Image (cartoon, coloured by chain):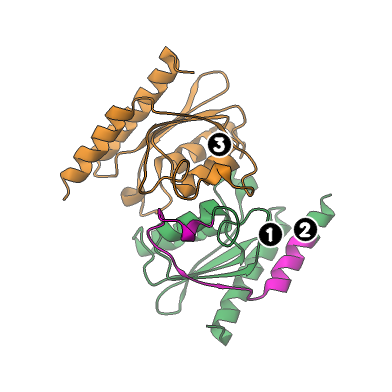
Chain colours: A orange, B green
């Protein structure tokens, strides 16, 4: 599934992550692509700006895409995100019926896909996307490391 | 922790659940109470009305309370909800730094607190509230059963 197109979508998510860093938000970006390959929504973290602990890039991009489609289910849509989703975002991805999840860097400390809660591996998870990881991993990981190193 | 006040807060959450049912939304309601015991926000599920898969009562009430306090952390606040939170909502409760979580009915099929992802029991969970369950359990459970029975 790694094509020029999927790489381009992850690079768009990375642009959103860079924009988040410039706003002093944790640099994570996300993109939702419709079944026809058209970008439906993009988002970066906005927890600080919005005073909203749920305003992770994945939650925002799902909300924006669902609003655009006027449908609470994003059936056939794919989500690209620069960091392994946390448990909240992984469960939101399941609730939204996302078809494919692409994430860049893994997150041993806060991830909820291949770490911690492993949301998609639970019997209480009623929809599991296809999962592809590692696309643009170094770029996403370096951005996060630089951001946090500058704040220590 | 079961006092007249905590019972009253759960009954307020139940009123929100009944209002959600009347809107043809899954009947779950939630309330956030500030450190001083004042109700900061109430919400019922609005996934259908808002076309937003993340618009569970808990996410909405956290967002409303955080907006009111102009702070992404609800330190010292308590959350009451009529159903065991799913993994998304449990993780949102942790991110919001909720002090105490009260839930009424348990949810073996979709819960993420004492079932499935058990979000608060993972090493990736960085804040765990005190948890109290069973308050007004029968009323919350009966409301859900009646709602789904009428739609089968």
> What's the chain of the residue with tag 3?
A
| Rendered residue at 39%/28% (across/down) | A134
> What's the chain of the residue with tag 1?
B
Label pair 2/1, CB-CB below 8 angstroms: yes
Relative to residue B83, is residue A38 drawn left or right?
Answer: left
| Label 2 SS | helix
- Give the distance between the C-alpha atoms of the residues marked 2 and 3, in whole angstroms: 25 Å
| Quarter of the view holding residue B35 | bottom left
**Does the stretch in magenta take in B123?**
yes
Q: Position of residue B132 (x, y in %)?
A: 55, 74
Label pair 2/3, CB-CB below 8 angstroms: no
The reply to whether label 2 and label 3 mark residues of one chain is: no
Q: Is residue B84 visible?
A: yes
| Rendered residue at 43%/66% (across/down) | B98
Q: Is residue B52 visible?
A: no
Q: Position of residue B41 (x, y in %)?
A: 49, 66
| Label 1 SS | loop
Is the residue B55 above or below the residue B30 in the image? Answer: above
Which span of residues is magenta-colored? B118-145
| Rendered residue at 77%/58% (across/down) | B147
Closer to the camera in the image, B14 or B115: B115
Relative to residue B2, is residue A148 drawn left or right?
Answer: left
Is the residue B128 above or below the residue A98 in the image? Answer: below
Label 2 packing within 10 angstroms: few (<14), some (14-19), many (20+): some
Q: Which residue is mark 2?
A: B147
Q: Which residue is mark 3?
A: A66
Q: Which residue is mark 1?
A: B27
| Label 3 SS | helix
Nearest to N terminus: mark 2 or mark 1: 1
| Quarter of the view holding residue B139 | bottom right
Mark identifier at residue B132 = none
């Amino acid at each position: 599934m790694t094509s020029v197109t999927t790489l381009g979508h992850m690079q768009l998510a990375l642009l959103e992550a860079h924009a988040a860093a410039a706003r002093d938000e944790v640099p994570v970006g996300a993109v939702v692509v419709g079944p026809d390959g058209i970008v439906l929504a993009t988002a970066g973290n906005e927890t600080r700006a919005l005073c909203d602990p749920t305003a992770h890039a994945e939650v925002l991009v799902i909300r924006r895409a669902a609003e655009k489609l006027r449908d609470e289910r994003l059936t056939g849509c794919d989500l690209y995100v620069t960091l392994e989703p946390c448990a909240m975002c992984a469960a939101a991805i399941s609730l939204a019926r996302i078809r494919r999840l692409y994430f860049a860097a893994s997150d041993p400390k806060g991830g909820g896909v291949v770490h911690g809660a492993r949301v998609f591996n639970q019997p209480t998870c009623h929809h599991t996307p296809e999962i592809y990881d590692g696309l643009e991993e170094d770029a996403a990981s370096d951005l996060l490391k630089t951001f946090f190193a500058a704040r220590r």
